[in-house]
Image (cartoon, helix red, strand yellow):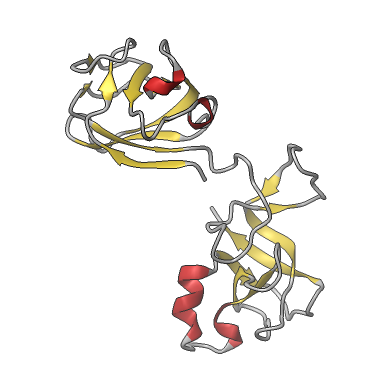
Amino acid sequence: LTNVASIDGKFVTSAGAAGTAYAVGDKTVYVRDSTVFASDTDVLGNYEGGKLGITDAAGEGYGYKIKASSIGDLDEVSGLIRFDLYDGLQVVVDSLSSCGIVGSPYKNLKIASANTDSPVRGITVVDVAAAEYAWVQTQGNVFVLCDESAGTVAINTVAVVSDGVDGAATVMGQGVPNSEEDLDDLTTEGFLGEWLSAGVNGEYVPMWLRLE
């Protein structure tokens, strides 16, 4: 997931100059930060489908879905990024406003593995090759590869990302209710849902997926 933590006072003009303000209804804004947006790979199309959020000062608390991101009118080393928004600004944003940026949660998905890919975005329902587009299921009844090596999967136990088999799911707390493993699992193994039946290691087992 591509994201930018809150950066302060970076809204600029289309030429990259400080001291600008954007009016209610504006659908194009410019942000400049040579550290965060150091190259075209940090900018071009990297945030489409994501959100630009105003985190502090004028306009704070509002979020806007990003239609497109581009390097704007200056050379890429200047750190200028242009955001085209689906909807216009609800309130004025000025040069002192801070913003945070989150890219599309479905861009460049890969096989989940514990501690590195949380939160999980969905379960593929067909085989998917690298660089292909595909649908992913985010809620409801789905069959998922079961890793039962660390604990017994039973009906209504909580399903989390496996820490031993990439792309698989296991049971939270190693299948022991209120075990000392519970807290670690919640913070390091992404939550998925509940198992709908007893599991068999290495087989696909039904789960009620709760990612939405």
Closer-to-camera residue (119/163): 163
In the image, 61 versus 202, the foreground residue is 202
Q: How many marks do you count on the picture?
A: 0
Q: Quadrant of residue 157?
A: bottom right
Q: Position of residue 148 (x, y in %)?
A: 71, 81
- Which residue appears at 17% of the width and 34% of the height? 57
Percent of width and height locating residue 167: 70, 62
Q: Is residue 103 above or below residue 152?
A: above
Above or below for 128 versus 24: below
- Residue 91 visible at all: yes
196 or 143: nearer the eye? 143
Q: Is residue 106 above or below residue 66?
A: below
Relative to 178, does residue 113 appear above or below in the rendering?
Answer: above
**Side of 78 relative to 70 (left or right):** left
Where is residue 205, by image quadrant? bottom right
Position of residue 158 in the picture relative to residue 152 (left or right): left
Q: Is residue 87 visible?
A: no
Res 41 → quadrant: top right
**156 with respect to 198 (left or right):** left
Instruction: Identify which residue is drawn at 49% across, 32% down.
Output: 42
Spot occupied by residue 76 in the image (x, y as percentages of width and height): 45, 20
- Image x and y of residue 195, in percent: 66, 73
